[in-house]
Image: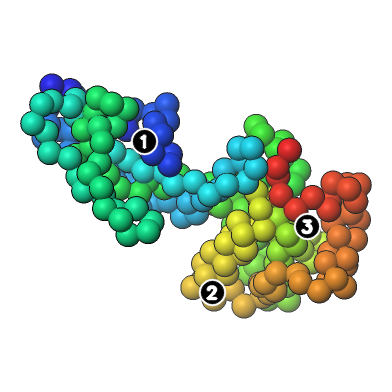
Amino acid sequence: MEYRVIMVKDGVLLKKTFYKTKDRKKAFVKYRELISKNKEVIFPKKYINLNGIKEAKHEIYIVKETEDGDSFRVIRDELGRTDVEKPFMDNWTILNSNVYNIEEKFWLYGNDSKSERVTIHEIIKPLIRGIANKTLTKKIIVVYNKLVIYNDDEFEMVICKCKKDAQRLHHVLLNSCSKNKYSNLIFMGTATTEFMISKMYDLIQERTGWPMLKIYRKNTRP
């Protein structure tokens, strides 16, 4: 009898088998260990770019080879209806499952958009650079799918998958900086007026040299 600990996205197996064994106890130990370690994720991936920007749910399953007489879980759908769970991929019985977060990686302006993506840790570093200087202030604002960090001398831009992701990043950074009492970081929320959006577009073009057509894009969808 084989047991496996696997990752799935929206109920579909990803190419990720964390662990496999013939020992049920060892399988559950590994499963719980992975869930405990997963709490270290700061900014979970919520959206994927696959034929458009879509929400995605990642989970970790512990499964066993299906046998006659197995008991299957009763599950509830989004409408509250219940049903008996079927074997996963037709031959695996799901013993337990849990949400599994993946640390999101971002395109930071100046880096290659694919090979040099960064986590929120690498975004915090330039955000708080020089912050001990109380005369220094930085503004942080969301412009559609872009999070812009700037003052007269510095400019950083994080290109997110969509506006909601940029807003989520803004709020996580705000909460983190509030806990550390960084009073010279000014979180401005989301640019909503045509005047502010136009002003930020001009700033982005001035600091990056990007054509306006590229700046106007509101998500990373091809």
Mark 2 neighbour class, 10 Å CA radius: few under 14, some 14 to 19, many 20 or more: few
Give the quadrant of the C terminus.
top right
Name the secondary structure under disc 1: strand
- From the viewer's side, name the closer residue of 215 and 56: 56
- Asked which quadrant contains residue 12, the reply is top left
Question: Mark 1 or mark 2, which is nearer to you?
Answer: 1
Mark 1 neighbour class, 10 Å CA radius: few under 14, some 14 to 19, many 20 or more: many
Residue type (three-letter) at the residue carrying disc 2:
Ser
Residue type (three-letter) at the residue carrying disc 3:
Phe
Earlier in the chain: of badge 2 and badge 3, it is 3
Q: Circle 2 sits on which residue?
A: 178
Earlier in the chain: of badge 1 and badge 2, it is 1
What distance separates the C-alpha of mark 2 from that of mark 3? 21 Å
Residue visible at 88% across and 67% down in the picture: 199
Percent coordinates x, y for residue 34 in the rendering = 29, 42
Q: Circle 1 sits on which residue?
A: 7
Mark 3 neighbour class, 10 Å CA radius: few under 14, some 14 to 19, many 20 or more: some
What distance separates the C-alpha of mark 1 from that of mark 2? 34 Å
- From the viewer's side, name the closer residue of 7 and 174: 7
Q: Is residue 89 left or right of residue 106?
A: left
Give the quadrant of the N terminus.
top left
- From the viewer's side, name the closer residue of 22 and 175: 22
Q: Circle 3 sits on which residue?
A: 155
Residue type (three-letter) at the residue carrying disc 1:
Met
